[in-house]
């Protein structure tokens, strides 16, 4: 993934049932007190991703754990001229041979901009180059991250904020979610995207960094908190994020033909995401993968 792209990017019933709510929310119940929710709008409205559409949001004992994370199964399209996010979407369900399938249509219609005191958008070549260099330093030089986070704090205190400005849509991505036992089956279709000048697609799987603080993988690596890094490629066959007490986690496998990245950021009141993303080539029309939910001491 290009350096400049990284920073812009980020009930004890053993049966799995999905329950509709009056506001369009769907709730999936796992074992114990673990659930997943998905909304027809951009909820939950947390921090700088408040405007964006979300995927599946994990919850434990009724408390949502996404914070700034966009949830499981959320597409981002990287074009030559800009990176497009989804601020508009539609949620629906239908029945298949394997049970209920939840479908969310993500419309890629928004780009990230910096707002000066909520009045003017900052998007000139100098600022883009500056933020690209900032992202490079932050990602590649771990010893500098604390100092760079302090600069983010100063920038925010000065009134500079991330906003998502609406643009003409560059197409849509339809994502299906199906649950069996403790596995979420995700299938994303990219045929609805405008492929002109499309460089690559990233499918994000994020939750909140206050809870998901521990990383481990099939190579035996264990990292906690700031050790995880900002946006790093996964070399192992599989990788997991969980809380340090192993109450709840989620795992993904590397897939042939695309790259898997891991990242975590935490800055009180500003950054709060922890997750993994698949980077997909622009000529691929679909992506299917599994997200294993770890509950308690489940093996993986």
Image (spheres, rainbow, N blue to C red):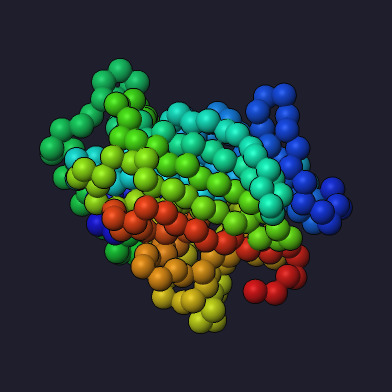
Q: Residue furthest front?
A: 97
Q: Nearer the viewer, residue 174 or 8?
A: 174
**Considering only vertical position in the picture, is 119 above or below 252?**
above
Q: Residue furthest top?
A: 119
Question: Where is residue 159 shown, x and y percent of the image?
Answer: 35, 27
Does 203 sit left or right of 45 as displayed? left
**Considering only vertical position in the picture, is 62 above or below 43?**
below
How many discs appear? 0
Q: Residue furthest left?
A: 125
Q: Nearer the viewer, residue 194 or 211?
A: 194
Residue 50 appears in the rendering: no
Residue 5 appears in the rendering: yes
> Residue, x 56% and y 72% (percent of image)?
216
Quadrant of the rendered image containing residue 91: top right
Question: Where is residue 88 shown, x and y percent of the image?
Answer: 45, 29
Q: Nearer the viewer, residue 198 or 262?
A: 198
- Quadrant where the image shows the N terminus: bottom left
Q: Residue furthest bottom?
A: 219
- Quadrant where the image shows the C terminus: bottom right
Does 126 sit left or right of 195 as displayed? left
Does 139 sit left or right of 100 as displayed? left
> Residue, x 71% and y 49% (percent of image)?
99
> Residue, x 59% and y 48% (percent of image)?
177
Question: Where is residue 156 shown, x and y percent of the image?
Answer: 37, 34
Quadrant of the rendered image containing residue 86: top left
> Residue, x 75% and y 65% (percent of image)?
296
Question: Where is residue 262 shown, x and y percent of the image?
Answer: 45, 62
């Amino acid at each position: 993934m290009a350096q400049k792209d990284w920073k812009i990017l980020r009930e004890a019933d053993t049966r799995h049932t999905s329950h509709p709510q009056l506001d369009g929310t769907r709730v999936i119940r796992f074992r114990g007190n673990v659930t997943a929710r998905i909304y027809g709008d951009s909820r939950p409205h947390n921090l700088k991703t408040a405007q964006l559409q979300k995927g599946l949001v994990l919850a434990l004992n009724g408390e949502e754990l996404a914070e700034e994370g966009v949830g499981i199964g959320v597409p981002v399209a990287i074009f030559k001229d800009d990176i497009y996010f989804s601020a508009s979407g539609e949620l629906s369900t239908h029945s298949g041979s394997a049970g209920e399938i939840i479908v969310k249509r993500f419309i890629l219609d928004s780009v990230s901009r910096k707002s000066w005191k909520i009045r003017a958008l900052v998007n000139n070549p100098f600022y883009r180059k500056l933020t690209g260099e900032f992202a490079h330093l932050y990602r590649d030089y771990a010893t500098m991250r604390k100092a760079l986070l302090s600069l983010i704090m100063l920038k925010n205190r000065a009134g500079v904020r991330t906003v998502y400005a609406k643009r003409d849509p560059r197409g849509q991505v339809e994502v299906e979610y199906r649950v069996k036992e403790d596995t979420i089956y995700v299938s994303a279709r990219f045929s609805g995207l405008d492929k002109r000048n499309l460089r690559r697609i990233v499918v994000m799987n994020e939750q909140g960094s206050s809870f998901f603080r521990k990383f481990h993988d099939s190579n035996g690596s264990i990292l906690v908190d700031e050790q995880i890094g900002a946006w790093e490629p996964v070399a192992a066959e599989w990788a997991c994020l969980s809380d340090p007490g192993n109450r709840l986690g989620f795992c993904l496998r590397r897939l042939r033909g695309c790259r898997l990245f891991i990242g975590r950021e935490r800055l009180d009141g500003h950054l709060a995401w922890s997750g993994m993303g698949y980077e997909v080539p622009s000529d691929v029309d679909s992506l299917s993968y599994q997200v294993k939910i770890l509950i308690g001491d489940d093996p993986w």
